[in-house]
Image (cartoon, rainbow, N blue to C red):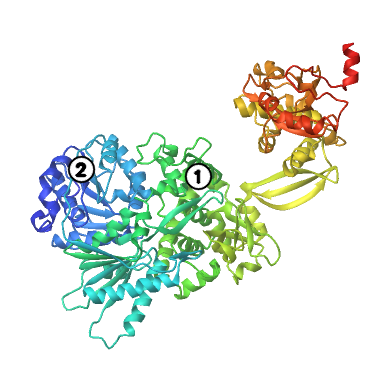
């Protein structure tokens, strides 16, 4: 490997006062094996000290750049600035960084700090990481999707280069699991900095969350607690809330409270910290205040939880909430939702107060709420949309992650869904291998959907700037209250929308990429056929909705009715536009963002559309052509088969007309009729009901292979038992002509069915000589016992109650009078003869004197006849 950089860092100066520096020799020994896992609590200085230590190790041997991954862009810049400053240099010299849209490195750069997403694309472009001597993966305990993928790919890259050093670092980590995945790598545990940390609780009496997210009252409570506690402690404070919106609102509320006490002699500066801020504003919050500056209250999302240090903080105020990815498989969507943070997260946040000295943490919730928090957050891979990950894995050569050393295996159903969508987008072929366009998309610095829109849009429009504008808007966290993308673009262009300058810079960068990719696409078409470009729509795109639809055609949506807010998506889900949205006049829209919501805000759909654009029906059908299918639907209407032929864009029916039924339509119509209306539309004779009851008893006693015959089971396996009758039906066939008894017998299991009549007979021979029908209970009956209704006199002498199913199930006798009126119910004849019979005899012998009522039923002759008729038989 070529030596790329040979700068030596002054470890004594960089490590001064850092606990981790005391473990330098242990870290060196572990890293010298080629891979190491290091656990070090916050405040020990692992992120500051270990990268220069590894860089010096490389300088002593083969050289090479150290790549240090940090989970967030603000942390990347902060870490690079801190190491560079301690080294006596500036960013872009011996220490540089790369984040999306910004790169500050030079030929002198020895340590390059970057986000997992940037490093993943670097690996895809160059799996051997030419010129790189070591990769340090920091904060791997956060278990982000990109972080887990990066760990697995870097671990596999070591197989290509045994000289590549890999170090995994974390504040809290299952070191054993990660060490095993790195080939039984040695581990080094750095002890905690034991600064005193105290806790207190300031719970909020009302609810913290409602259908819309964090309640206004709770944010006001957080602001009040932050101001009060900062006044009490007089130091810098760090306030944790779940998202950027809450950060901005709490900053405003704190400023308002401080302004109301403007006459106080205790000025305080309030600063936000979240991913939507400009780099300058982020840096302002993460750098220490100069001597003489007023104390600060920094309001932050979870990005300050572990991967970033806010200097000077000795007070933490924690909301106990976090944003986590949740996947709604029913709607095929993933999104960030506000939930209770984990206990591990709460401990991490509290620990920020004691990194540099004694500290205090205020939890703005109760001790009981803390105890109910989950122990740790679930890995993001378990609930995230895996489309981007699936393409990256395909390009890496491990489709679906199969055979890759991932810390957590992705859910198979979610991964299969992502792979199917990649194929529909023509980014992978039928075998899961990436197409040329798929490979290019994986290397672009935006998500898969956005990259596809950029590439296809660039090849079908002369207005590259509009394409770049739309992709820049949807690839960042821009929002518009009415959900109208066109209005959002107008506000971004005018500078009125938050983050407008960031969007304009991203637009320029994407426009340049689009020009480059259009040139590549043009050259590709000259030499060979690329499915995604050669099949690209020929229309010149000039509408934001059309460009948006290219990113997610399965979220093309059509209004469910005139004046409705509800839209049906091609994917099958439903969602509602916000009230008053300009898009309400649009029959068709292309949707970018959907958020789960309840009540009026979602118009009963359970989801609200947060960003979309109008699109014409013609453009929707053209862009969604791959989702269009023709279907015939057959139904029974007024006893007749009626057929409609429909054209559908996914789940959206956009054309429908009646057509003449064909022979195969009858079976389909009858099947749908039974499934929709239920089994009651069939003609159930007594014999069929008896057979069903007998089968139900066998299933209840034995289970498989005897079939379940409840309504749900029979409807689920309709084809198995009724399919042959339905398949042979003619348009004139009536359902009441089908023999359900014969149909049910198709469910009998063989060879077990050979004993069916023995185990569950249709009739019971009683002492009188009669063969009485056994009434078997249907699956949903409250009393499941088989019943025999018989005249009491026919059972004289019957000492033992007969039992069915090899003696497992007793018969329940309904004992009847000579007029077949009920006298008693029993499944224990012996007890009946010895007790209740005498009471029945006293009451009945005067009422029915012509029938025998012997004092001793044990020895009496069983009969169905009167005494005189029986005497004639006996005489």
**Disc 2 designates what residue?**
2
Q: If the image is split into quadrants, where does the C terminus sit? A: top right
**Disc 1 designates what residue?**
418
Check the image and report above or below for 83 versus 751: below
Check the image and report above or below for 827 versus 107: above
Which residue is pictured at 43% across the width and 54% down the height?
325
Distance (Cα) linking label 1 and label 2: 39 Å
Left or right of 157? Residue 217 is right
Q: Quadrant of residue 852?
A: top right
**Rendering coords of residue 402 (x, y %):** 42, 35
Residue 195 visible: yes
Mark 2 nearby-residue class (10 Å; few <14, some 14–19, many ≥20): few
**Rendering coords of residue 727 (x, y %):** 78, 31
**Rendering coords of residue 806 (x, y %):** 63, 18
Mark 1 nearby-residue class (10 Å; few <14, some 14–19, many ≥20): many
Which residue is pictured at 18% across the width and 43% down the height?
188
Which of disc 2 and disc 1 is earlier in sequence? 2
Q: If the image is split into quadrants, where does the N terminus sit? A: top left
Secondary structure, mark 2, is: loop
Which residue is pictured at 54% across the width and 50% down the height?
332
Q: Nearer the viewer, residue 865 or 669?
A: 865
Which residue is pictured at 23% across the width and 66% down the height?
360
């Amino acid at each position: 490997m070529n030596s790329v950089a040979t700068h030596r860092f002054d470890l004594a100066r960089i490590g001064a006062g850092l606990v981790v520096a005391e473990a330098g020799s242990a870290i060196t020994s572990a890293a010298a094996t080629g891979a190491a896992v290091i656990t070090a609590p916050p405040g020990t200085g692992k992120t500051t000290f270990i990268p220069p230590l590894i860089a010096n190790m490389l300088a002593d041997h083969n050289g090479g750049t150290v790549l240090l991954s940090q989970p967030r862009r603000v942390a990347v810049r902060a870490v690079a600035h801190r190491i560079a400053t301690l080294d006596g240099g500036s960013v872009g010299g011996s220490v540089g960084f790369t984040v999306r849209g910004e790169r500050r490195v030079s030929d002198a750069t020895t340590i390059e700090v970057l986000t997992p997403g940037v490093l993943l694309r670097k690996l895809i472009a160059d799996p051997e990481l030419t010129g790189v001597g070591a990769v340090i993966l920091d904060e791997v305990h956060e278990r982000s999707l990109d972080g887990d993928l990066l760990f697995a790919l870097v671990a596999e890259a070591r197989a290509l280069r045994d000289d590549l050093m890999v170090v995994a670092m974390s504040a809290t980590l299952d070191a054993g699991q990660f060490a095993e995945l790195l080939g039984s790598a040695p581990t080094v545990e750095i002890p905690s900095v034991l600064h005193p940390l105290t806790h207190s609780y300031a719970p909020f009496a009302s609810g913290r969350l409602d259908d819309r997210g964090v309640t206004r009252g709770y944010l006001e409570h957080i602001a009040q607690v932050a101001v009060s506690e900062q006044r009490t402690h007089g130091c810098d404070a760090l306030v944790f809330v779940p998202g950027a919106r809450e950060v901005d609102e709490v900053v405003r509320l704190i400023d308002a409270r401080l302004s109301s006490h403007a006459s106080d002699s205790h000025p305080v500066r309030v600063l936000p910290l979240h991913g939507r801020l400009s780099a300058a504003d982020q840096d302002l919050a993460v750098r220490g205040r100069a001597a003489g500056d007023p104390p600060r209250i920094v309001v932050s999302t979870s990005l300050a939880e572990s991967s970033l240090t806010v200097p000077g903080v000795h007070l933490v105020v924690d909301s106990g909430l976090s944003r986590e990815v949740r996947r709604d498989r029913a709607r095929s969507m993933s999104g960030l939702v506000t939930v209770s943070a984990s206990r591990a997260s709460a401990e991490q946040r509290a620990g920020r107060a004691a990194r540099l000295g004694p500290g205090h943490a205020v939890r703005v919730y109760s001790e009981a709420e803390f105890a109910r928090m989950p122990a740790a957050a679930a890995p993001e891979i378990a609930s995230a949309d895996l489309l981007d990950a699936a393409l990256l894995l395909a390009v890496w050569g491990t489709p679906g992650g199969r055979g890759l050393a991932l810390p957590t295996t992705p859910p198979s159903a979610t991964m299969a869904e992502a792979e199917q969508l990649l194929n529909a987008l023509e980014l992978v072929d039928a075998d899961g291998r990436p197409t040329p366009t798929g490979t290019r998309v994986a290397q672009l610095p935006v998500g898969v959907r956005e990259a596809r829109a950029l590439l296809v849009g660039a090849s079908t429009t002369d207005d590259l700037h509009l394409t770049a504008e739309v992709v820049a808007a949807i690839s960042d966290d821009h929002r518009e209250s009415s959900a109208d993308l066109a209005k959002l673009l107008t506000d971004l262009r005018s500078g009125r929308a938050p983050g407008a300058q960031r969007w304009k810079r991203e637009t320029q960068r994407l426009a340049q990429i689009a020009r480059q990719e259009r040139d590549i696409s043009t050259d590709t078409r000259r030499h060979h056929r690329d499915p995604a470009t050669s099949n690209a729509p020929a229309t010149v795109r000039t509408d934001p909705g059309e460009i948006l639809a290219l990113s997610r055609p399965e979220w093309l949506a059509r209004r469910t009715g005139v004046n409705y807010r509800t839209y049906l998506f091609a994917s099958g889900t439903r969602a509602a536009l916000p009230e008053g949205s300009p898009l309400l006049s649009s029959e068709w829209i292309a949707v970018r963002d959907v958020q789960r919501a309840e009540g009026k805000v979602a118009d009963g759909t359970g989801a609200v559309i947060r960003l979309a654009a109008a699109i014409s029906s013609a453009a929707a059908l053209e862009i969604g052509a791959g989702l269009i299918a023709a279907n015939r639907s057959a139904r029974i209407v007024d006893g007749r088969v009626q057929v409609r032929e429909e054209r559908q864009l996914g789940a959206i029916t956009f054309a429908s007309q009646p057509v003449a039924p064909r022979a195969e339509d009858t079976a389909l119509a009858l099947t749908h009729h039974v499934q929709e209306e239920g089994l009651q539309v069939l003609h159930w004779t007594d014999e069929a009901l008896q057979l069903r009851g007998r089968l139900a008893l066998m299933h209840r006693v034995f289970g498989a292979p005897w079939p379940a015959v409840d309504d749900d089971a029979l409807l689920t396996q309709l084809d198995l038992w009724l399919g042959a009758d339905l398949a042979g039906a003619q348009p004139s066939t009536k359902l009441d002509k089908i023999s359900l008894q014969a149909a049910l017998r198709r469910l009998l299991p063989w060879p077990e069915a050979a004993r069916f009549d023995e185990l569950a007979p249709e009739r019971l021979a009683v002492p009188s000589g009669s063969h009485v029908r056994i009434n078997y209970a249907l699956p949903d009956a409250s009393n499941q016992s088989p019943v025999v209704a018989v005249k009491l006199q026919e059972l004289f002498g019957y000492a033992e109650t007969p039992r069915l199913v090899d003696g497992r199930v007793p018969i329940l006798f309904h004992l009847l009078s000579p007029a077949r009126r009920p006298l008693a119910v029993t499944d224990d004849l012996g007890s009946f003869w010895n007790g209740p019979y005498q009471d029945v005899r006293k009451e009945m012998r005067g009422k029915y004197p012509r029938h025998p009522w012997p004092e001793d039923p044990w020895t009496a002759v069983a009969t169905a006849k009167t005494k005189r008729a029986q005497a004639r038989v006996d005489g």
